[in-house]
Image: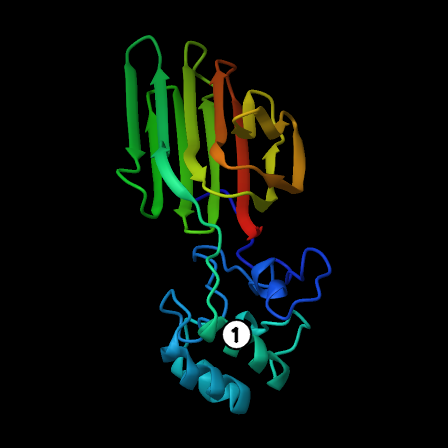
């Protein structure tokens, strides 16, 4: 990939609003850190099997008494996710919330996925008076599972050449949606190629439609970036009443940090990321790029 982005974790999240209950901070946003490429853990899931149950008692105890041993025995887990009272520390003060989670489980709001359309695609056309060469490639997510794919195309003729690259990594989790992608298109015409031309196109598009069965506090964070002309990176969250949130980047970068309560109903998160370049000027290089990262989380009910 020619695009680049940080894979570091977002800053830790605290509770969304003050509550008196011991358990509510856990349910209203104290889910610990979210690692890109993984679904957010269930509160109290100390062995990282996707559920909080009696099987977590041993690992939870080990995390409190010997964090180093816990990290060694559970390398895919993050001990910070066991900060169940959201005080930024994992210690004995989290025991009461852990006990409540096991003895009085509360159903967390979840996303029920209905449809999805996730794809990466590219096209490169390099042509002159003697040749016209076009290459295309695309890849589409077949189901609701993780989608991590890219297309990388290069083609040239006697006087011109082009490059198209599109990438996407997206995950549809029970309480979160993660989508990250970028596109790069480049076109080159040789100095002696007065009849040379190159045209390139790339797209990394994301769409997931889901249903909420109950009112939920939702947080949407991330960014969309399109710093060049002829590149468009747009993000939309729509619902029963129309547009909930939108960010449209054209020669700009937009940071996203949005929270709202969404009523029961069907919602759709969409990202359109595409760019194209057409070059016919001898001895020149022309390039475009766009990038996005979105994290939608259910942080409470």
Residue 79 appears in the rendering: no
In the picture as drawn, the residue positioned furthest to the bottom comes out as 65
Q: Number of labelled discs?
A: 1
Q: Give how far across and how far down residue 225 sits, in percent.
A: 60, 35
The image quadrant that residue 201 belongs to is: top left
The image quadrant that residue 28 belongs to is: bottom right
Q: Eyeballing the image, is 64 above or below 217?
A: below
Give the residue drawn at x 67%, y 60%: 15
* Nearer-the-camera pick, 86 or 4: 86
Q: Give how far across and how far down residue 210 sits, in percent.
A: 42, 37
Q: Residues within 10 Å of mark 1 (few under 14, many from 20)?
A: some
Give the residue drawn at x 50%, y 84%: 63
Residue 239 appears in the rendering: yes
In the picture as drawn, the residue positioned furthest to the left comes out as 142
Q: Dot 1 corresponds to which residue?
A: 100
Q: Give how far across and how far down residue 290 sits, in percent.
A: 54, 33
**SS assignment at label 1:** helix
Q: Eyeballing the image, is 37 above or below 166?
A: below
* Nearer-the-camera pick, 22 or 62: 22
* Nearer-the-camera pick, 179 or 52: 52
Q: Eyeballing the image, is 46 above or below 142?
A: below
Give the residue drawn at x 42%, y 18%: 199
Q: Give how far across and how far down residue 233 sits, in percent.
A: 55, 29
């Amino acid at each position: 990939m020619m695009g680049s982005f940080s894979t570091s974790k977002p800053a830790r999240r605290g509770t969304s609003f003050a509550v008196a209950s011991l358990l509510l901070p856990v349910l209203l946003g104290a889910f610990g850190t979210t690692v890109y490429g993984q679904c957010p853990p269930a509160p109290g899931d100390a062995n990282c099997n996707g559920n909080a149950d009696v099987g977590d008692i041993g690992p939870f105890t080990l995390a409190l008494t010997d964090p180093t041993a816990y990290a060694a025995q559970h390398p895919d887990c993050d001990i910070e996710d066991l900060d169940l009272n959201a005080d930024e520390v994992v210690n004995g003060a989290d025991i009461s919330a852990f006990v409540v989670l096991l003895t009085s489980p509360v159903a967390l709001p979840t996303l029920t996925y209905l449809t999805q359309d996730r794809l990466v695609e590219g096209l490169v056309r390099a042509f002159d008076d003697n040749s016209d060469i076009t290459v295309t490639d695309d890849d589409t997510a077949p189901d609701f599972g993780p989608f991590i794919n890219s297309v990388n195309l290069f083609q040239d003729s006697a006087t011109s050449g082009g490059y198209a690259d599109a990438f996407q990594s997206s995950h549809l989790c029970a309480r979160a949606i993660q989508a990250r992608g970028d596109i790069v298109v480049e076109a080159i015409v040789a100095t002696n190629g007065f009849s040379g031309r190159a045209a390139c196109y790339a797209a990394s598009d994301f769409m997931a439609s889901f249903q909420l069965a109950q009112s939920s506090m939702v947080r949407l964070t991330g960014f969309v970036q399109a710093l060049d002309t002829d590149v468009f990176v747009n993000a939309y969250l729509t619902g029963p009443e129309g547009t909930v949130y939108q960010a449209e980047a054209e020669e700009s970068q937009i940071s996203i940090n949005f929270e709202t309560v969404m009523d029961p109903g069907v919602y759709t998160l969409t990202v359109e990321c595409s760019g194209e370049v057409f070059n016919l000027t001898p001895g020149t290089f022309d390039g475009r790029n766009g990038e996005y990262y979105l994290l939608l989380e259910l942080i409470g009910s």
